[in-house]
Image (cartoon, helix red, strand yellow):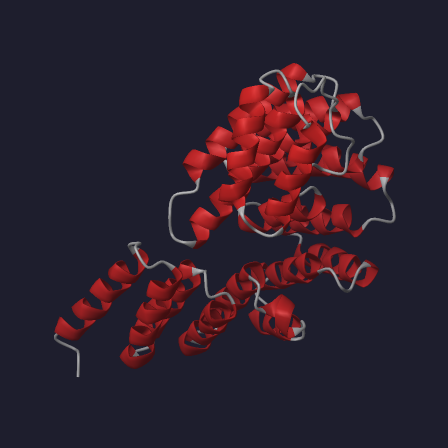
Amino acid sequence: MHGRIALAFVIACCGVAGCDRPAPSSQARVNVPASAAAIETYLREGLPDEAMRVADRLRELEPNSALAAELQARALLMAATHDAERGLDPLPRRRLALERYGEACAMAPREAGLWRSQGVAADMAGDAARAIYCYQAAAGLDPSSMQDRLLLGLAHLRRREFEEARRALDDAQRLAPDSPWPVAAQASLRAELGAFDEAIALAQSAVAMAPSEAGLTVNLGKVLRQSGAAGKAIDVLMAMNTEQRLQRGATEELALSLLDLGRVADAARAWNDCALASPNDALAASEAGRLWLRAGDRARARACVDLARVAQPEGTIANDLQRLLDESMRSPTAP
């Protein structure tokens, strides 16, 4: 497993919200707890710009606070996610978040959670080598942590370093034998190696351990699709509850399976449903529109232009989709 699903595991297992560790201490010259609480509230409400303003001011007043640097990083990562949904490049903010986590780790080098979070930020910024270094540092500081071995194994897997991935995932499973996440990651490793029967059995076992975890079901769908069983993957994904199925990761995997079977209009409809359920996700609207065009349905593609424009009023996504629509109308094969 590498790419998007691997990062979904990273978010599910660790998240960008501090990785369930105690916050580093700070000798406050300002009311740090109150500022941190305000930032947490903004992040919880999905308001990263407001969170960044408070975090930047806190860092200005407390330049040597690891907590202030960490809060800046978390706000930047959420802002980057919003950028991606609007079709903007998320990498500049992800890289800046990575810098802030690096500064936090320099100020609190014994905090395993900070190294883990820096690794997640490095993963999101596409810096696999740095992610591996950070996860190794976190694992060294916290020998009992399953998360760090799991994240380390996934990072190696994205680099197709299979033996290193296996060792890390074996360690993760040993440390947390009742957790489904190392089992699911082992399934993804087996799929990459072409051992599909074993991969499917492991992925099914992970789902059975935690049926309500959407990421595990999506991973099973991916393993089934990789094995050539796209129809079974569709059945698994369509059995998810509506809210889970309309999440981006599930929609993407469902659409890929549908495309494997040549069901382009159904893949377009899956993305269209996702866009309607997430009105700020211009990329989902764009993906739906492109697939509607591929299916020959210009009317629905035109509606997706409007959806993209609502999600990103001043962006380029709707314009790019409109350009494709115009080109299709000028095509010699256009009716």
> For the point 29% across and 80% down, which residue is it?
299
> For the point 68% across and 27% down, which residue is it?
31
> Within the image, what quadrant is residue 198 found in?
bottom right
Location of residue 201 with respect to 129 vertically, above or below = below
Answer left or right for 23 relative to 230: right
Answer left or right for 331 relative to 197: left
Task: Name the one closer to the observer, 281 or 215.
Answer: 281
> For the point 61% across and 33% down, which residue is it?
71
> Within the image, what quadrant is residue 201 found in?
bottom right
x, y percent for residue 120:
61, 36
Task: Name the one closer to the observer, 244 or 93.
Answer: 93
Q: Quadrant of the C terminus?
A: bottom left
Location of residue 139 with respect to 325 vertically, above or below = above
Residue 324 appears in the figure: yes
Task: Name the one closer to the observer, 95 or 186.
Answer: 95
Task: Name the one closer to the observer, 272 or 34.
Answer: 34
Answer left or right for 83 relative to 61: left
As drawn, the residue found furthest toward the front would be 30
Residue 331 appears in the figure: no
Q: How many marks?
A: 0
> For the point 63% across and 52% down, which residue is it?
191
Answer left or right for 307 relative to 333: right
x, y percent for residue 318:
30, 62
x, y percent for residue 79:
49, 43
